[in-house]
């Protein structure tokens, strides 16, 4: 039985939460097989795959069904489904039972999917820089925040959460995702000494994530990528959620063209709206 009180405490303490065995070995194998069928370029050529939303202008070149006006108008039109189009297994992760209680605990009853993409790495690929999208280290720290991590009335109020599904053993000596635990509450900018060589800093941890694990973390957490040392490839699927009235970009993730979504999954792909007034609860019965 999942202890939500413990999950809440650990998430608040560290800024992230790892849930092991969220996916069975069969589910992991299915997702990896579907990715293999895409004949993606090697990680050295592109560390990301299956992104959505994509740039509308790039869609116009490949998809004649997308009108050019969509690419140039700058409107908040859905532009691409990313890897959701690769099979039902990817759509099932949208509201997987391992993550929905934590998302509800962190974001409330009304939240949406803002964007998604996959990541892969091969041995020896160097690390990516540490960053945070909110707080003292964020590049827009002097602007009015569009996302937040605040605590009042015994509850966390948070804007964005990343859910990263690990489809291969990662973390620890392998490398991959790394972060500074507790940095989501820091009031000071990341020191240059840590930023420039974070792969060697004792302040930076690489949470152990066996294949089938999922990690949820706040975008306010200072996080990045450590050098990949394993013989096998790193492979992860990232789904980024936000409270229903926020949006990172004016573009939207489109519904997949070849997978029938559940009512809840359809809600997750809706336009932004005020919670419970213009955007419905994800946890009430939805009329089909």
Image (cartoon, grey):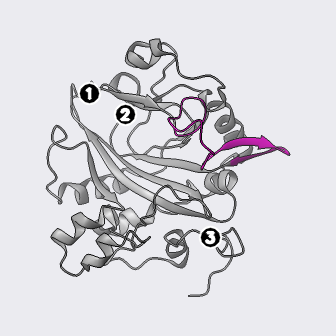
The earlier-in-sequence mark between 1 and 3 is 1
Q: CA distance from mark 2 to mark 1?
A: 8 Å
**Residue at horizontal 50%, vertical 75%?**
266
The disc at residue 186 is: none
**Where does label 3 land, which residue?**
273
In this picture, is 175 found above or below 270?
above
* x and y, in percent, of residue 196 in the image: 39, 17
Tell me the mark number nearer the camera, choosing from 1 and 3. 3
Q: Which residue is mark 1?
A: 230
- The secondary structure type at the circle numbered 2 is loop
Answer left or right for 118 relative to 65: right
Q: Which residues are magenta?
A: 133-157
Distance (Cα) linking label 2 and label 3: 36 Å
User: What residue does disc 2 label?
Assistant: 170
Question: Would you say the magenta stretch is mainly helix, strand or loop?
Answer: loop
Mark 2 vs mark 3: in front = 3
- Dot 1: element: loop
Residue 10: % across, % down = 66, 35
Dot 2 or dot 3, earlier in sequence = 2
Is residue 247 depicted above or below 174 in this figure?
A: below
Query: Are there few (<14), some (14-19), or many (20+) residues within 10 Å of tag 2?
Result: many
């Amino acid at each position: 039985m999942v202890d939500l009180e413990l999950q809440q405490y650990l998430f608040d303490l560290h800024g992230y939460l790892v849930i092991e065995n969220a996916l069975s070995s069969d589910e992991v194998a299915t997702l990896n097989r579907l990715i293999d069928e895409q004949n993606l370029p090697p990680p050295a050529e592109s560390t990301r795959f299956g992104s959505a939303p994509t740039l509308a202008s790039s869609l116009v070149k490949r998809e004649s069904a997308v009108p050019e006006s969509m690419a140039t108008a700058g409107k908040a039109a859905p532009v691409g489904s990313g890897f959701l189009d690769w099979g039902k297994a990817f759509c099932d992760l949208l509201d997987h039972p391992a993550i929905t209680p934590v998302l509800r605990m962190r974001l409330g009853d009304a939240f949406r999917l803002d964007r998604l993409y996959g990541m892969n790495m091969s041995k020896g690929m160097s690390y990516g820089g540490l960053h945070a999208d909110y707080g003292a280290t964020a590049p827009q720290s002097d602007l009015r925040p569009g996302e937040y991590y605040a605590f009042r009335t015994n509850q966390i109020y948070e804007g964005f959460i990343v859910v990263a599904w690990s489809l291969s053993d990662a973390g620890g000596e392998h490398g991959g995702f790394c972060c500074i635990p507790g940095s989501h509450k820091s009031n000071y900018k990341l020191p240059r000494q840590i930023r420039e060589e974070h792969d060697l800093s004792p302040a930076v941890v690489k949470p152990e994530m066996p294949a089938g694990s999922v990690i949820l973390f706040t975008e306010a957490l200072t996080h990045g990528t450590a050098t990949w040392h394993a013989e096998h490839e790193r492979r992860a699927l990232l789904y980024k959620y936000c409270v229903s009235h926020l949006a990172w970009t004016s573009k939207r993730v489109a519904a997949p063209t070849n997978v029938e979504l559940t009512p809840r999954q359809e809600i997750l792909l809706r336009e932004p709206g005020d919670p419970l007034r213009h955007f419905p609860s994800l946890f009430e019965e939805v009329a089909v």
